Image (spheres, rainbow, N blue to C red):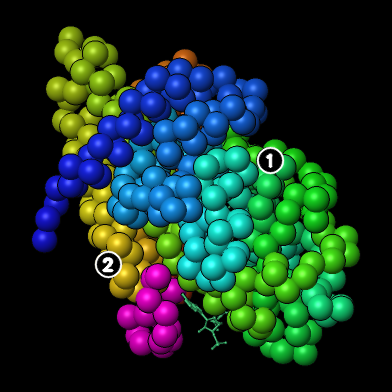
């Protein structure tokens, strides 16, 4: 048991922290206000290797471990959670499954442009009537020639408007039940048409889109993993992806705590700093304790992933707890700042709005509890390690 990051992990953490402080934090309020996706920022992140952190160097990545990637995500999300989700989906929901499930040819062809940040990745699973019940998706891939013709619609797809590579799930066997008969495909931007830019409560610097696939013809080279086994690709991808969202939630909670603690030391009421009032001390103590606990769950899940052990349960626990801590503690940060916390003069109202989604995407808290319950009750055995 070692609670200290290694020298290499600290290096990535410091790199991400310094970059976030200099290049993200000063602009985050403006991007939020103007709903601006900072496309150029991802070019700079790519120059630092942060768009392919845990991707092997031979595929254009920085070749770090998964823990380093999680530390970087935490730092980016601390400055701007919208930037955090963009990098998280790009990396753990698209680039890494291409490495885990792709043929050598697919890895060599599709991974380097993603790892070098030339393309952004988008993970297209959710549909208007297939959210938590992801296996009920209706997008169809009908066999044609030596490939498939894909038709359907996807909803709330992070990065879609700016993405060059899509990991998209479609039903190849209409007769099979729910999750069975789903296959995973690698699509390009010109295979899809973006139909909507979503307006959201928060995460305004990230792109969330609806899209349609209008009879896109793809060859066998676009099938990721086995035909009919795409749902496993989706589930295993989400197992690790959830650790990334947990790190994002952790970054948001840490940011809110940092502001609240500093404010409490400077704001005077009844003749002393509010940090000297027990009511405020209790809040800060709870915030710090919960954030520490969330951090341990997140780092444990990431460490298991690096060891190649299954992360279904550990990732779900990390995401469940960290996201609920983020929602609770960003609310407490507003409470400590009082009226100021409710205004745009301080960033905590943005953290509060950004935190909420971490309890919803990559599986709601209700779905995390279901995944954890199935695991602890031995109701489902997966043959896959985390890859
Ligand atoms: N690893 C590998 N395989 C798995 C698995 C896992 N963790 N979980 C399930 N499977 C396999 C099962 O073994 C089963 O395989 P067989 O048919 O061969 O037996 C198959 O997948 C179906 O499994 P279930 O019967 O458990 O499927 P289900 O229909 O009951 O659904 C669920 C399970 C956990 C509820 C799943 O639907 C789920 O995770 N829902 C939430 C969806 C989600 O997280 N969406 C996020 C969208 S992406 C996003 O949000 C990105 C973003 O913008 C940030």
Magenta span: 371-387
Residue 307's tag is 2
Q: Can you say whether 38 is above or below 290 in the image?
A: above
Quarter of the picture holding the N terminus: bottom left
Q: Residue 348: which quarter of the image? A: top left
The answer to whether any part of residue 367 appears in the image is no
Q: Is residue 297 magenta?
A: no
Q: Residue 137: which quarter of the image? A: bottom right
User: What kind of secondary structure does the magenta stretch mostly adopt?
Assistant: loop
Please say if the residues under marks 2 and 1 sit with CB atoms less than 8 Å apart. no
The answer to whether any part of residue 209 appears in the image is yes
Residue 247 image position (x, y, % from top left): 37, 48
228 with respect to 336 (left or right): right
Quarter of the picture holding the C terminus: bottom left
Image-quarter location of ligand 1: bottom right
Q: Is residue 384 magenta?
A: yes
Residue at image point 68% right, 78% down: 182
Mark 1 Cβ and ligand 1 under 8 Å apart: no
Residue 90 image position (x, y, % from top left): 55, 49
Q: CA distance from mark 2 to mark 1?
A: 33 Å
Q: Can you say whether 177 is above or below 105 in the image?
A: below
Going from N to C along the chain, the mark reached first, 2 or 1, is 1
């Amino acid at each position: 048991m070692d609670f200290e990051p290694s020298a290499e992990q600290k290096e990535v953490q410091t790199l991400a922290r310094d970059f976030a402080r200099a290049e993200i934090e000063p602009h985050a309020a403006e991007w939020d206000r103007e709903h601006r996706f900072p496309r150029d920022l991802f070019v700079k992140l790519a120059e630092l290797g942060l768009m392919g952190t845990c991707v092997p160097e031979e595929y254009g990545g920085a070749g770090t471990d998964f823990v380093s990637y999680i530390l970087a995500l935490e730092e980016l999300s601390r400055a701007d959670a919208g930037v955090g989700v963009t990098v998280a989906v790009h990396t753990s929901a698209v680039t890494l499954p291409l490495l885990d499930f792709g043929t050598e040819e697919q890895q060599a062809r599709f991974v380097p442009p993603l790892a070098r940040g030339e393309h952004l990745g988008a993970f297209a699973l959710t549909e208007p009537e297939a959210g938590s019940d992801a296996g009920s998706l209706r997008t169809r891939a009908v066999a044609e020639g030596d490939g498939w013709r894909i038709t359907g619609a996807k909803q709330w797809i992070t990065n879609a408007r700016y993405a060059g590579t899509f990991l998209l799930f479609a039903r190849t066997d209409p007769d099979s039940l729910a999750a069975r008969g789903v296959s995973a495909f690698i699509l390009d931007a010109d295979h899809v048409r973006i139909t909507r830019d979503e307006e959201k409560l928060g995460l305004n610097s990230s792109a969330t889109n609806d899209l349609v696939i209008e009879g896109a013809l793809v060859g066998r080279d676009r099938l990721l993993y086995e035909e009919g086994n795409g749902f496993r690709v989706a589930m295993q991808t989400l197992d690790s992806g959830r650790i990334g969202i947990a790190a994002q939630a952790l970054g948001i909670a840490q940011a809110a705590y940092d502001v609240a603690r500093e404010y409490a030391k400077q704001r005077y009421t009844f003749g002393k700093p509010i940090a000297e009032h027990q009511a405020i001390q209790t809040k800060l103590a709870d915030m710090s304790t919960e954030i520490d606990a969330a951090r341990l769950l997140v780092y444990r899940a990431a460490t298991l992933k690096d060891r190649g052990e299954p992360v279904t349960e550990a990732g779900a626990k990390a995401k469940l707890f960290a996201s609920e801590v983020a929602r609770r503690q960003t609310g407490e940060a507003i409470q400590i700042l009082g009226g100021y916390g409710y205004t745009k003069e301080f960033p905590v109202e943005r953290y509060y709005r950004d935190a909420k989604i971490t309890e919803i995407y990559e599986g709601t808290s209700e779905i995390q509890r279901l995944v954890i319950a199935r695991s602890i009750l031995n109701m489902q055995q997966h043959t896959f390690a985390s890859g």
